[in-house]
Image (cartoon, helix red, strand yellow):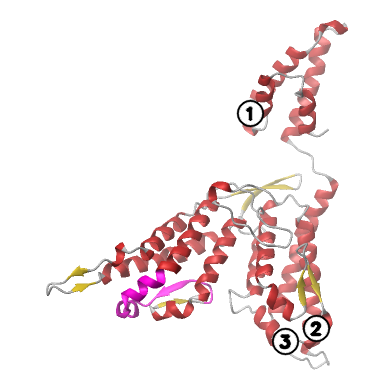
Amino acid sequence: MNFWNSTNSLFGSGTSNSSSNLYSLFSERASIKNGTYKRLLKSYFNSVGSDSDGTTSAKKNRSSNNIIDKLLKEKMYPTVSKETQEANSNLTSGLNSLQSSVSALQKSSTYEDTENGSTAADKVVSAMKSYVTNYNNVVTASKSSTLTNKTAYVANMMSATSKNAKELAEIGVTLKQDGTLQLDETKLKGADISKVQKLFSADNIQSYGSTISSRVKFAGGSSSTSSTTNNTTTETTTSKGTSAAALKTDSEALASSELYAKTKDKDGNETYNVDKILSTAKSFVSNYNKMFDAAESSSNSGVLSNLSYIREKTKNNTKALEEFGFSVDKNGRMKLDEDTFKKSDMSKVQNFFKDYGSYVASNASRVNYYMNTNASAASGYTSNASYNIPAASDYSASI
């Protein structure tokens, strides 16, 4: 018997408004633990019983208690269907297989001919077939799985695939409307395998292959604290995103006009307060790196997507950043050459951060929000793997 169906019949159209209010209280797990739930149920059953049917009070109480105990048991230990348990199991095993497939496509040896006659092209096709099969198994299983600390990473993985759909199509891998992949072996065989290798590069942390690998790795559960009951998982989030909030503040400062207000020197010339601007830029770099260190292992898709947007924005502005002394290493962490920054034209720095700083501030704000909510980790993704970012106040859990 499903709990919510049973309570709907118990507290249906024949009940008063107070019973409807009582119904809303039952959703609180705490009310079960502290005994409030059971006392309310007892009170309800005692009030709705009819004496006209000849049933003794003792029998009615025993019957009521049996129903109450059954409802309590179902509420505390919700049953999981056989199909859901199978999906949970398939997702877990599928992620392990997918990790192996990605690793194969990241190995340099996959792109080399071997002495036994296997050509690099044949090896790439074989590895890609395995990848597509395992990727599809994971996506399919995730749609029926209740393991939200895993489906969150699958959702982000699907978003990464959507962003790289054009590059994947060039090598014969097509993204379908249901989020799965389809492989054209003939097209892949005729493709430049260097494109495949670049797409799955292990040396570039921002490559498609590296992104998929990291999402699958984190989905294995090594970076999260969770408790499991009947194949359902509840994740405990401990990071509070304070570095993301600090990055938002620094980004807004670098994008503002106040920071670049000129002051007069002893000779009466108007100059920028370079030391003040440099101090803010150093804080920006520090909090940028701290945010990624703290948030990259999150299982919340809102966090992961906004980190991805910031990383992509930074990548697209690499040349401009380097002009001002900013650089990004292969792990996606930022560094600042203070001497180069001091010699930079501060008016150009200001113009650059009006756009870049505002963008980072906006997404860092969302990272901070999602790291401080219990929003469903896998929500917001459509069937074709695109991610819809709502305003923070409008966030709702649906997949």
CA gap, disc 3 to disc 2?
A: 11 Å
Viewer-side residue, 163 vs 332: 163
Can see residue 84?
yes
* Residue at 79% in and 40% down: 79
Can see residue 297?
no
Quarter holding residue 288? bottom left
Tell me the kind of residue under disc 1: Ser
Of circles 1 and 2, the one toward us is 2
Q: Which residue is mark 2?
A: 187
Return the x and y of residue 34 as percentages of the image width and height. Answer: 62, 27
Q: Which residues are magenta?
A: 330-353
CA gap, disc 1 to disc 2?
A: 60 Å
Quarter holding residue 261? bottom left
Q: Which residue is mark 1?
A: 31
Tell me the kind of residue under disc 2: Lys
* Residue at 55% in and 71% down: 312
